[in-house]
Image: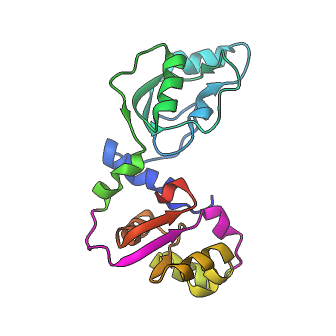
Amino acid sequence: DMPNFGDRLNEDVCRFLSGSDPVWASPKRCNATFIGSILEKFIYRRKRWTADALWIKYFRSKVDVWGSGFIKDPESSDERLMRRLNIRAVRGKITLERLRRLTGRALDDVAIGDPGLLASRLYPAKKVPFRVCGIIPHHAELAEIKRSDEIVAIERESGILLDSTVKAMPLFERLAKAIPGAVVLNPESAPKTVIGRVSECETVLSSAMHGL
């Protein structure tokens, strides 16, 4: 998969909330969901229930939902869930309202907020911000740039993109030049590295939600 610190943060969030090491599993088999627009994966798409689908829904354990969300509007007014959910937190109010319709439950005790908000607890800032601004491109924008393996390794280790990479991204180059002291951060670095760099910045500009 394409490196993306926001999605990779899931591993550390899982350990923080559950005390267990994460292992990837499909929506049909997983025990929990965390960061991401992944609740669409739990919508049952067929018009009629199959025996296998009914067994998965009613005989497998509930899926703990920790701050996940939807990314698309419902495709129909009679959509259904393929798994039973134990909803502990959701990303936002729109997700909460949709899950209320899907489950028929009030869900008044459900927390609202992306698990990325826990980043400061996972990686407490060790420095007072000393950079004016950190600029974070979307990982898909960075993937379009041709770089040598050596440069990729250097940038992932440091958490900051080299000038040669920034020059290949005209918008980010202009932003960096327009803001004296700004640096362009690397969304492909490990979560601890990216969040550490973010904590060094007084202001953050990001073209992806993960950066915020």
| Identity of the residue furthest to the front in this view | 178
Horizontal side of residue 172 vs 203, given as left or right: right
- Vertical placement of 100 versus 88: above or below? above
- Residue drawn at (66%, 17%), measured in percent from left and top? 77
Q: Nearer the viewer, residue 46 or 77?
A: 77
Residue 131, percent from left and from top: 38, 78
For residue 164, say whether it is visible.
yes
Q: Nearer the viewer, residue 190 or 129?
A: 129
Q: Nearer the viewer, residue 52 or 88?
A: 88
- Residue drawn at (56%, 42%), measured in percent from left and top? 37
- Vertical placement of 109 versus 143: above or below? above
Please identify the quadrant where the N terminus is shown.
bottom right
- Vertical placement of 129 versus 108: above or below? below
Horizontal side of residue 155 vs 79, given as left or right: left
Residue 41 in magenta stretch: no
Q: Nearer the viewer, residue 44 or 62?
A: 44
Coloured how? rainbow
Residue 130, percent from left and from top: 33, 78
Residue 134 in magenta stretch: yes
Per the rendered image, the range of residues in magenta is: 124-146
Horizontal side of residue 206 vs 16, given as left or right: right
Residue 151, percent from left and from top: 59, 84
Residue 183, percent from left and from top: 49, 78
- Vertical placement of 131 versus 144: above or below? below
For residue 61, say whether it is visible.
no
